[in-house]
Image: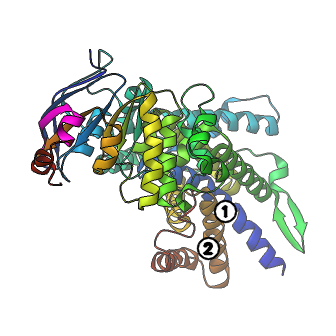
Amino acid sequence: MSTIVLLAITGFGLGAMYFLIASGLSLIYGLMGVLNFAHGAFLTVGAYATWYTETKLGGIAVAPRFLLAALVGLAIGTAFAALVEVVLIRPLYGRHIEQVLVTVGLGLCVSALATAIWTSDPKFVSLPRWTSQTTGVLGASIPNDRWLEIITAGVVLTALELFLRRTRYGLIVRAGVENRAMVTALGIDVRRAFTLVFAIGGLAAALAGVLAALYFGTVDPQRGTSLLIFAFIVVVIGGLGSIGGTAVAAVVVALVQQFANYYASSGMGDLSVVLLLAVVLLVRPRGLTAAAA
Amino acid sequence: MALLEVRDLHVRLGGSHVLQGVGFDVAEGGVTALLGRNGVGKTTTLRALLGLVPADGRVTFGGDDITNEPTHRIVQRGVGYVPEDRDVFSRLTVTENLQLARRNGDGRFPYVYELFPELRERGGQPAGTLSGGQQQMLAIARALLNENRILLVDEPTKGLAPMLVAQVAHALERVCDESTVLLVEQNLTVVRHVADHVVVLDTGRVVHSGPARELLDDRERVHALLGVA
């Protein structure tokens, strides 16, 4: 029982990270039709900015230092994403091949740049002691960082839903996912919404970078790329443009991965996720919740 | 001076030269009907005026050159658009569709609800679950929510049952009383009721332009130009 609880909550923690990356990816594709292969770079930028800031903040207690560094990481990740949209993506709307080339290239550049500057060795992040302690639940000792990851993803999910349902920009995004041309024909400059969605996606990905540092205890140049692959799977399973679907798919993918890795063998988790993707594509080609934006 | 002046408008789509130098004026305060057989470029003309398809030529609105302006800026000048296929946002509720269309201030909700009471009753319903007629009402209401200087209305009665055609036509008559309208419409009965001027297109060119009554009363000419009696 305790093993199942541990695997489930760890799965939810991993799912939280998948959700944070995939939610931005899903909105960006849903609204703009951009397959953003550079999304993992937003995570990398956020994670490295957090780690680097933390190393430069001497003389402060670990907890406030990590918090401060995380805020800097989030700000830099968000600004980087907005800049990418304005400078690289905006001139390429409607040109899908070029978008793929540019975003793949940018993703490779960012990880290569991080490797060149800081080597490919994982960088250890000093974390508040509480995060490495455990809490007992039904006989299982759950690392506290998992709770933080789950709560953060829950807060982001709620905030995104409120943004989409209760704000005018959210209304524009939901309408734009459905029919971008008609949104402009109502007199709305949809490009502002594009930049905003990219920035929100960047913020969520940078947050995933911070949480990945918590989850794995380190920052490395390839983390963004490896998590991005699963985020794409989550987006396809959840249904493009659907935040609720993305959340459900992120949890399902992470749980399948965790349980398969434990009860089958290490590596079976990744294979099981690919099999799950194949089944969903066969049964519901547009994803679990394709109808809901 | 005309409110809208279109000169030598050319549109090329996917290798086809759809509009081949279209030119006409829309007088302020009147209703100009853009007529023609299927596929002659009527919808493309409206989309080109709004900047929804790339076009060459010159379009002036209220004396300002709006050629190649972004669509949202053209609309913000006071251009309302009712598209051919309604294009309501099916996953958004009726109220959300209307709220999205509101450009400045509070929007003329009382006016559109008086015109289409059903939209108030169905405010919380996803627009995709409305009937074709109700979706058409929503598409028209969306354009009427703001005070526009001109409305571009594309086949508002297309595909509707006869009873709904009458309802939409009645609403259209009221709209035409208070606003300049460029109307694309196949239903000549509706055109006869509302239009002051007509412009007839054929294979991407203007082949006739003049008072509506003059053309519509000439059955032979109508048959020759539009293929209907």
- Furthest-bottom residue in view? A264
Between B136 and B77, the one nearer to me in the picture: B136
- The chain that hosts pointer 1 is A
- Whether residue B9 is visible, yes or no, is no
Mark 1 falls on what kind of element?
helix
- Whether residue A252 is visible, yes or no, is yes
Q: Residue at x 19, y 28 (%)?
A: B24
* The disc label shown at residue A14, or none: 1
Residue A289 in picture, x, y percent from top left: 57, 66
| Contact, mark 2 vs mark 1 (Cβ under 8 Å) | yes
User: Which amino acid type is shown beneath numbered disc 2?
Assistant: Gln
Image quadrant where one finds the N terminus of chain A? bottom right
The local crowd at label 2, few if under 14, some if 14 to 19, many if 20 or more residues have their Cα within 10 Å, is many
User: Which amino acid type is shown beneath numbered disc 1?
Assistant: Leu
Image quadrant where one finds the C terminus of chain A? bottom right
User: What range of the chain is rendered magenta?
Assistant: B204-216
Q: Which residue is the site of mark 2?
A: A257
Residue B95 in picture, x, y percent from top left: 62, 46
The local crowd at label 1, few if under 14, some if 14 to 19, many if 20 or more residues have their Cα within 10 Å, is many
* The disc label shown at residue A213, or none: none
Does the magenta segment cover residue B212? yes
Does B144 sit left or right of A205 as displayed? left
Mark 2 falls on what kind of element?
helix
Between B166 and B107, the one nearer to me in the picture: B166
Q: Residue at x 41, y 60 (%)?
A: B162
- The chain that hosts pointer 2 is A
